[in-house]
Amino acid sequence: MKTVGLIVEYNPFHNGHYYHIEAAKEATNADAVVCVMSGYFLQRGEPALLPRRNRTMMALQGGADLVVELPYIFSSQHASWFAQGAISILDHLGVDTICFGSEHGEITPFLKLVDFLETQNQPYNEYIKAFSKQGYSYPKAASLAFSKLEPDKDWPDLSQPNNILGYHYIRAVNDLNSSMTPATIKRAKAHYHDQQLSGYSIASATSIRRSLIEQHQSPDSIREAVPFSTYQSLSHFFKYEGSFYNWEQYFEFLQSKTLTLSSAFLSEIYEAEEGLHHRFQSMIKTHTTFHSFMEALKTKRYTWTRLQRFAVQVLTGTLKSEATEAIQSKHADHIRILGMNQTGQAYLNLIKKHMELPVFSTLPKHKTPQQQLDEKAAMAYYIPLTPEDRKIKWKQEYEQPPIILD
Amino acid sequence: MKTVGLIVEYNPFHNGHYYHIEAAKEATNADAVVCVMSGYFLQRGEPALLPRRNRTMMALQGGADLVVELPYIFSSQHASWFAQGAISILDHLGVDTICFGSEHGEITPFLKLVDFLETQNQPYNEYIKAFSKQGYSYPKAASLAFSKLEPDKDWPDLSQPNNILGYHYIRAVNDLNSSMTPATIKRAKAHYHDQQLSGYSIASATSIRRSLIEQHQSPDSIREAVPFSTYQSLSHFFKYEGSFYNWEQYFEFLQSKTLTLSSAFLSEIYEAEEGLHHRFQSMIKTHTTFHSFMEALKTKRYTWTRLQRFAVQVLTGTLKSEATEAIQSKHADHIRILGMNQTGQAYLNLIKKHMELPVFSTLPKHKTPQQQLDEKAAMAYYIPLTPEDRKIKWKQEYEQPPIILD
């Protein structure tokens, strides 16, 4: 059984994702699509619009055959750790090809670029250090350093978000000595940072989220940009919950924690560093929205994403010591199955006996270090609900089996 | 200028308090009444019904001349620390007499009892230890130990809450070598633990709170039990705020903190002990109200008050190390003036130049260890408000001058 692996957030699942699944299957001649999906908090340091389970259903309805979770410790991380965690899971699941979407769209230049940067590792890092010292954020410093190395103009542009991720996926494949073949597909039409809905049938997840959250619109506003099954799921969710999960709902909890924890303790939170947690503590009490707080915090050095990721770590109470313990092995310490169809189930049965990692469908009593953080992330994610709903959602973490789509 | 000192919570100020002020002035022939009042969190481990400022106003309208704050670290504490902090402040303010209400009502038997227990310190503590080992809570063990010592039947009964406090006040006066004279007044009519409003004009604060919070009644229901000025304040507050501060409003914040802090960190919270914080973490996710959570936690060993006090420490994020630093001197490290009338102002001017402690009317930039905890308590107290109201209240902590009643 030939498989292709995708690394996804589906926040929410849209036409571009549907196209990606179709194209990846075709390009790799795969019988099954295996998705490793972030759970509750995402790479840019945001809560997912909808719970993991709703997004798993969208994925299965959109063509995925097996969906497993990317543990929290990898999901709200900079690209290299995010990639490392996700690739390790696809590798453990015996996936043949990892196929990522990129702005560039050709795999050979990616492979050349990775090789090049491995030989240029020392000057590259020195340039990054030098630009960081000038006060640039890490992504910006990396991008400037890269151009200093005078790259081939056919290589992927590492200032593009999906090219960066792709670069890290390939590096992780190499680091893990994985036998997976990397492949890429050119992202269709919309660019990641597009902020207005394109009006075409393919829009970026960012512009979709903007419609749903900042503009408080119903899913009718993005109907053309998502598969009908996603539209139905979003409409149902919107009708019963009234809004999608977003940072503003967590702001009071972030304030509560930031203002009542000692600064010595805040400094022990993962991703804290001197200037950052002090700024958090001194500035958070004069803001009434998460958005205005972030705007005020943002500097050349601290990007919005960097700040949001730290805020997520505060919200979930993730300590440096816990993070270090959870990622010291550099790969996932368990596999959590979120959902599958019959093809996915057949594939899982095929590989199950050879798998080296423990496989779970719920949170167990005795947890791995990564599961301990997954548990805290789930607790934190559902905190804005009413007491009754919160209790139910928390309970389901330990009890609800994966989705099986017939 | 002759002064009498009272140690109060005024949660809320009622007819019994009014009577206490009047009687204390008369009994001690005092020209001025100095009250040391708990701020936002009270001795039984509860948020105050109304903010400090509203309760200060009630106190001034009810006959107090000068109101100062009992710092947080003493206000949500067992009786001995509560007494130590409060007495140290009255002593620093040069108060002549400390006059407390008690179930017993005569001062000489109190003084004899304190002397007796000082000579019997060793067997008393051994009995307490033995009863504690049998699983009794500290107050119960202390009460059983006391009866083992065969006390004189004319002495105050130490199973009565106000007798216990009185006993600790006198001990603190002795410990601090204070020149204050202890005096007591028999509490009028209502007993502290009364749960139904008496229908008479004197009801306990507990029964008043029960009407206002658990029975969600408007202040009209307790109109006969409080002075008219209190009734007006409560009605105004109820009309604009919709409800009085109570534990249920904080439950989601308690859940958020308890479930996302590591158990190693929770064990560093003041008043945490092995069995207790583990029970908190494992049980809090299955409850939808603070009340049901407390009911489920309660054991012979852990009284409701003990549990609530720990919950307050979690909510305010008070660490053992911070508490130790803040109370190591065994007395207040500053005086915060909350309000005064002209008599109080005259008295303050009289003593100001002799005072050894720094006097504040707002939270300063550089804080004493006790003020650091006061700040966190204020942050925690206002967290259930709307973002806008919360911001205003937090800001006032640093800016709002004391109340001056003409």
Image: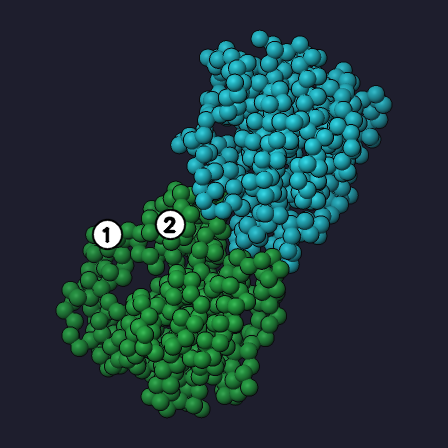
Chain colours: A cyan, B green
Label 1 Cα neighbours within 10 Å, binned few <14 / some 14-19 / many ≥20: some
Q: Residue at x 36, y 82 (%)?
A: B19
**Dot 2: element:** helix
Q: Which residue is mark 2?
A: B293
User: How far separated are the C-alphas under marks 1 and 2?
Assistant: 21 Å
**Dot 1: element:** loop
Q: Report whether A375 appears left or right of A202.
A: left
Q: Nearer the viewer, residue B193 or A89?
A: B193
Q: Which chain's residue wears label 1?
A: B
Q: Position of residue B190 (x, y in %)?
A: 29, 74
Q: Earlier in the sequence, mark 1 or mark 2?
A: 1
Q: Quadrant of residue B309?
A: bottom left
Q: Amino acid at mark 2?
A: Phe
Q: Are marks 1 and 2 on the same chain?
A: yes
Q: Is residue B17 above or below residue B369?
A: below
Q: Residue at x 49, y 76 (%)?
A: B232
